[in-house]
Image (cartoon, grey):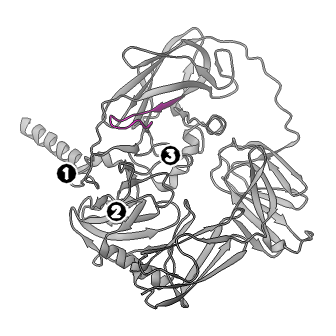
């Protein structure tokens, strides 16, 4: 019997270790890991899919394969991960390296051949299993700041065989962290109109009392009915001041587990539903993310487990209870929040509800179309999480569509009928969202079909018709017409469009397409003469830049090279 038990324990241990191999993947950089972003960290519209590794505020650090495998995907884009490499490994996992400055020599040549063949800077390629094999510790790229990066760093991911990102720290990628998470705010929420917290039927901030131990207590609250809680919490590692995400949150009511949120793995399809985890209304008004420790309807996130009554607690009259929250980082450092709850029944004074007669009801599970003047707005089924009354008004060409405080699952669609719009520049009209005190227009991707223009959006707000008749500007940076560029490696041109933004560009020398890399953050187009495409002495450069409503500018110049 003892032998059977021992074999069982050994097999369980082996299984536990083999689930996440600990010595398989290496640090992709040759420096100590210091993070500016952690896995599943809360971002504006998604969970962060990997680790953001600091690169000492510079670009060009060698990026190594985390393990042997083959390059299964290469993507070059203006936004997102910028220049990125995906490597599939024999154990079934895939590692991702994003915001790269450039690739290693053979990978760089492979992708440039593709770019010249397709005549496009933005490309996405899927090499076969034999084309680009990589060995352990091979330099595959150099760190950079491309795409939607806010500064030089390496974005590093590990994905499972279903393309779901997982926390790289599960695989032994080590970051020094001896600091416990901290909590900056705690809130209580009534589940329905029959619940009360401190006599109120609304979200209530609770007074947080830090303890010498590093834990927190909350001033005793009175409550009645079904209520939930929310926290604002972060974690810091030892070597960086950044407020990063936590790894695990557990809640307990009178010693019994109520809910657990485990930030270990998620799918990209569910990442957009971060709007259901956080208090979206509070975030849009206060720019702070409260993590709700309860589950509302239409919440498909897979992060939850050990769920009891969807995380809500039931408080009865004349009772004394304790609600606790345990917040942990990946290294097991933890912080507790203790909330004493006294049950106290009180007759709820029903306050007069706002007049809904001038609002439009949008059902979460039905398709609804709103119409006024020359505007229609389509809400398809499951656009909203909850049935909601919204403001809808059209004045002239301006659409007032509620405030951006209701979370949406997917786009609604705005349609303008331009049949009666008299303008010689009707083809330059677009749909804009108006922001700020001065209602500055920002381009929303607009499509045309006959007299109808349409745009999709996931945010309520104010929209209007705008017109753009101004062509993009093109400015040479490091050369001028008739200049000799024999000693230059790069040709640099700045392109800019103030109203609707750059849609496309094309550059040729002596009629032949040349690769010009576009960095939207610096608005710079750059050609590398080391591509060895420009070989003539006299060269005629032509660049055509087009904005998002079709305005185009052409720049032409002559330069010489020996």
The residue that label 3 is drawn on is 301
SS for dot 1: loop
Measured along the vertical axis of the image, is residue 162 above or below residue 486? above
State yes or no: discs 3 and 2 in contact (Cβ < 8 Å): no
Could you tell me residue 373's position as x and y percent? Answer: 91, 59
State yes or no: discs 2 and 1 in contact (Cβ < 8 Å): no
Q: Is residue 334 left or right of residue 234?
A: left
Q: Which of marks 1 and 2 precedes in the sequence? A: 1
Q: Is residue 335 magenta?
A: no
**Location of the C terminus (image quadrant):** bottom left
Residue 465 in view in this figure? yes
The residue that label 2 is drawn on is 142
C-alpha span from label 2 to label 1:
24 Å
Closer to us: 25 or 300: 25
C-alpha span from label 3 to label 1:
30 Å
State yes or no: discs 3 and 1 in contact (Cβ < 8 Å): no
Closer to us: 507 or 200: 507
Which numbered dot is residue 23? 1
C-alpha span from label 3 to label 2:
35 Å
Q: Is residue 555 left or right of residue 217?
A: right
Q: The magenta stretch spans which residues? A: 231-243
Measured along the vertical axis of the image, is residue 154 above or below residue 202? below
Closer to us: 287 or 192: 287
SS for dot 3: loop
Could you tell me residue 161's position as x and y percent? Answer: 35, 61
Main SS, magenta region, reads loop
- Name the residue rendered at 44%, 45% in the picture: 40
Could you tell me residue 254's position as x and y percent? Answer: 44, 18
Could you tell me residue 465's position as x and y percent? Answer: 82, 61
Residue furthest left in the image: 3
């Amino acid at each position: 019997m003892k032998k059977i038990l021992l074999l069982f324990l050994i097999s369980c241990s082996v299984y536990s270790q083999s689930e996440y191999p600990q010595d398989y993947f290496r640090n992709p950089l040759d420096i100590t890991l210091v993070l500016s972003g952690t896995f599943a960290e809360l971002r504006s519209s998604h969970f962060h899919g990997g680790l953001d590794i600091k690169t000492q505020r510079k670009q060009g650090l060698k990026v190594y394969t985390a393990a042997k495998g083959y390059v299964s995907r290469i993507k070059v884009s203006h936004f997102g991960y910028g220049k990125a490499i995906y490597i599939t490994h024999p154990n079934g996992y895939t590692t991702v390296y994003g915001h790269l400055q450039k690739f290693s020599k053979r990978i760089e040549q492979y992708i440039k051949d593709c770019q010249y063949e397709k005549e496009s800077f933005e490309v996405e390629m899927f090499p076969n299993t034999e084309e680009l094999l990589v060995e352990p510790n091979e330099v595959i790229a150099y760190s950079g700041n491309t795409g939607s990066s806010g500064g030089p760093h390496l974005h590093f991911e590990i994905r499972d065989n279903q393309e779901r990102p997982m926390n790289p720290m599960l695989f032994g990628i080590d970051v020094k962290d001896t600091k416990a998470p901290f909590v900056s705010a705690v809130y209580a929420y009534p589940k329905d109109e029959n619940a009360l917290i401190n006599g109120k039927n609304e979200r209530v901030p609770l007074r947080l009392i830090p303890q010498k131990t590093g834990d927190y207590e909350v001033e005793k609250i009175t409550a009645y009915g079904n209520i939930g809680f929310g926290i604002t919490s972060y974690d810091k590692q030892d070597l960086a001041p950044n407020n990063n995400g936590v790894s695990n949150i557990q809640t307990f009511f009178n010693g019994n587990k109520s809910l657990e949120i485990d930030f270990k793995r998620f799918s990209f399809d569910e990442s957009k539903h971060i709007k259901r985890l956080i208090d979206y209304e509070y975030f849009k008004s206060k720019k702070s993310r409260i993590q709700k420790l309860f589950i509302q309807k239409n919440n498909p996130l897979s992060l939850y487990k050990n769920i009891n009554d969807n995380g809500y607690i039931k408080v009865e009259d004349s009772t004394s209870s304790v609600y606790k929250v345990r917040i942990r980082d990946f290294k097991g450092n933890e912080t507790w929040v203790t909330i004493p709850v006294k049950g106290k029944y009180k007759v709820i004074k029903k306050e007069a509800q706002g007049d809904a007669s001038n609002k439009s009801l949008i059902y979460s599970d039905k398709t609804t179309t709103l119409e006024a003047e020359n505007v229609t707005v389509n809400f398809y089924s499951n656009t909203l999480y909850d049935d909601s009354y919204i403001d809808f008004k059209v004045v002239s060409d301006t659409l007032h569509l509620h405030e951006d405080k209701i979370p949406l699952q997917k786009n609604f669609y705005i349609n303008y009928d331009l049949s009666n719009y008299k303008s010689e520049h009707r083809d330059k009209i677009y749909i804009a969202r108006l922001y700020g005190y001065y209602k500055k227009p920002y381009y929303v991707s607009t499509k045309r079909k006959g007299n109808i223009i349409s745009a999709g959006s996931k945010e309520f707000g104010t929209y209007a018709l705008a017109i753009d008749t101004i062509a993009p500007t093109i400015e040479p940076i490091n050369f001028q017409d008739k200049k000799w560029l024999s000693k230059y490696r790069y040709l640099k041109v700045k392109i800019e469009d103030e109203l609707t933004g750059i849609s496309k560009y094309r550059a040729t020398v002596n009629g032949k397409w040349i690769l010009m890399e576009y960095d939207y953050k610096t608005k710079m187009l750059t050609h590398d003469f080391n591509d060895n495409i420009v070989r003539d002495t006299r060269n005629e450069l032509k660049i055509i830049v087009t904005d998002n409503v079709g305005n185009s500018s052409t720049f032409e110049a002559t330069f010489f090279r020996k």
